[in-house]
């Protein structure tokens, strides 16, 4: 489907606020998500392919991870196998795990978001991604900043530029395997023009 979800408020949701399966250019704009117990927004596809959904201008707060796992739940915005998506201009605070997680997505753009108080990695591009742009985001308080990872699962080609990463926690309360760092990059990534401060670990892991 294609369509628009705008100006809508989701509050105290037992599972996920909004789930999209196999969309074609869905627009989610100027919405509010508060206290979603397992995730705020999920853009998922049954098989990898073009999705083209846009998420912008939303405010997402206090997302839980009641569904368990080590990252399947607890994310403000979660893209899975959804190519060509744009996530921009959102304010995402207090996600149990990740503010924005893109898993196995091609040509995704994560631009100009505020990611505050994330319980694990604030922004993730992982597992078989290709062509990720992560730019001009502000990350303040997280267990780790930005992860561009899984070259071993086909992840490749990313740019990470103009981001501010600050006040990283010494440990994650939800994932003890997470180590404190500003930016971790592999998989044919370019990392340039970022500002990183107050990290009790490594600034940039390459």
Image (cartoon, rainbow, N blue to C red):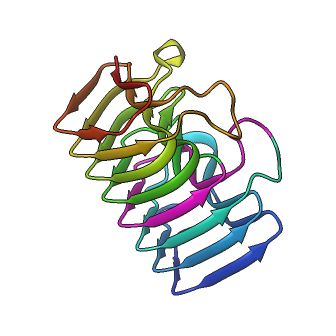
Q: Position of residue 127 (x, y in %)?
A: 54, 27
Asked whether, in this view, residue 30 is left or right of residue 176, the answer is: left
Most frequent secondary structure within the magenta stretch: strand
Asked whether, in this view, residue 166 is left or right of residue 170, the answer is: left
Asked whether, in this view, residue 108 is left or right of residue 197, the answer is: right
Q: Position of residue 165 (x, y in %)?
A: 34, 44
**Residue positioned 63% across, 37% down in the render:** 172
Q: Residue at the far left: name it.
A: 193
Q: Residue 22, can we see it?
A: no
Position of the N terminus, as image quadrant, is bottom right
Q: Residue 94, can we see it?
A: yes
**Residue positioned 55% across, 50% down in the render:** 118
Residue stretch rendered in magenta on the structure = 69-96
**Is residue 95 part of the magenta span, yes or no?**
yes
**Is residue 73 part of the magenta span, yes or no?**
yes
**Residue positioned 71% across, 40% down in the render:** 174
Q: Position of residue 3 (x, y in %)?
A: 52, 76
**Residue positioned 53% across, 45% down in the render:** 101
């Amino acid at each position: 489907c294609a369509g628009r979800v705008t100006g809508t408020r989701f509050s105290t949701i037992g599972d996920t606020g909004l789930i999209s399966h196999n969309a074609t250019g869905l627009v989610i704009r100027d919405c509010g998500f508060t206290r979603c117990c397992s995730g705020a927004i999920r853009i998922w596809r049954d098989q990898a392919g073009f999705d083209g959904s846009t998420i912008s201008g939303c405010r997402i707060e206090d997302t839980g991870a009641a569904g368990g796992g080590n990252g399947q739940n607890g994310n403000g915005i979660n893209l899975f196998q959804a190519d060509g998506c744009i996530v921009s201009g959102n304010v995402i605070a207090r996600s149990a795990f990740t503010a924005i997680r893109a898993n196995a997505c091609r040509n995704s753009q994560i631009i100009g978001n505020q990611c505050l108080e994330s319980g694990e990695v604030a922004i993730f591009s992982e597992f078989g991604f290709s062509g990720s742009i992560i730019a001009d985001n502000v990350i303040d308080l997280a267990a780790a900043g930005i992860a561009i990872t899984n070259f071993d699962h086909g992840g490749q080609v990313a740019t990470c530029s103009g981001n501010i990463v600050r006040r990283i926690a010494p440990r994650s309360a939800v994932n003890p395997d997470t180590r404190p760092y500003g930016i971790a990059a592999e998989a044919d990534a370019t990392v340039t023009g970022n500002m990183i401060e107050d990290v009790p670990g490594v600034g940039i892991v390459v």
